[in-house]
Amino acid sequence: MKVAIITGGAKGIGKAIGLKLASLDTDIAIWDIVDEGEQSAKEISSTHKVKARFYKVDVSSYNEVSETIKKVLDDFNKIHIMVNNAGITRDGLLLRMKPEEWQSVINVNLTGCFNCTKTVLKTMISQRWGRIINISSIIGITGNFGQSNYAASKAGIIGFTKSVAKEVAKRNITANAIAPGFIETDMTLSLPDEVKETYQKQIPLKRLGKPADIANIVAFLTSEDASYITGQVINVDGGLLM
Ligand SMILES: NC(=O)c1ccc[n+]([C@@H]2O[C@H](COP(=O)([O-])OP(=O)(O)OC[C@H]3O[C@@H](n4cnc5c(N)ncnc54)[C@H](O)[C@@H]3O)[C@@H](O)[C@H]2O)c1
């Protein structure tokens, strides 16, 4: 039985990842700042024969992350998979962007990824097995109008992932990033219908993505079949970027 931590696992893509990994007999630790995480953990443990627990933690706080890792180890004993999925947007043109809008996105999306990966590594190294999966975005590759903070954080995740992959490869730990395109979740719900329709027209596969489209790739990357893949960025975007 493997153990996975999924940050931002209360809803959206993170919740879908939890459900998918649970279907593959993986115990799940959901990390999130919203209480919906409790409900998601209950849903996972009631529909699959695995243990699932919710931990209320802000990934941008190194202290909170270090304390929560200890709690997970007390509860589950091991940690095999770390999915750094928690993310936020604070969109705005650079000319109008407030320093706190820049900083909060960097703190959650990029520093959160650093905090969680750094604190989990020791356990993975001692197990001589680990899978780190970081959720970036195609915006980190292309950049986007009104998203300089978000694009910088997601591009940062790509550089971080490749560096970590090089550092830990000899320990039998892989680190990969997934770059989703447009996925239907709360994050994209508030976008105007015209924006969604424009995206849909541009996507070669002619549909917006679903959280399960990302969860399926996470499942593959955690499997033994993916043991020779590390330091990669896998676009899951219906062909939008090609
Ligand atoms: N939806 C998309 O189209 C899309 C596209 C590319 C990348 N992504 C990325 O996928 C990831 C998941 O996004 P989503 O669409 O499911 O969004 P979402 O808003 O539905 O879920 C994000 C989750 O992260 C949690 N979270 C936010 N700040 C946190 C913090 N400080 N500590 C712990 N948890 C925190 C939220 O409470 C929420 O449960 C994000 O990293 C996002 O940038 C999403």
Image: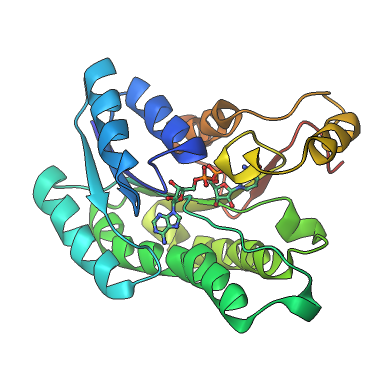
Image coords of residue 229 (percent x, y): 57, 44
Rendered location of residue 228, percent (x, y) = 54, 42
- For image coordinates 26% across by 53% down, the residue present is 56
Write down the quadrant of residue 71 in the picture.
Answer: bottom left
**Front-most of residues 180 and 188:** 188
Decide if residue 114 is in sight here.
yes
Q: Position of residue 27 (x, y in %)?
A: 25, 33
Residue at the far bottom in the pictured view: 99
| Figure disc tally | 0
Does any portion of residue 48 appear in the rendered image? Answer: no
Relative to 45, does residue 218 appear above or below in the rendering? below
**In the rendered view, how is the structure colored?**
rainbow
Camera-nearest residue between 60 and 176: 60
Q: Position of residue 99 (x, y in %)?
A: 61, 83
Residue located at (53% from left, 63% from top): 109
Choose top left, top right, bottom left or bottom right for residue 216: top right
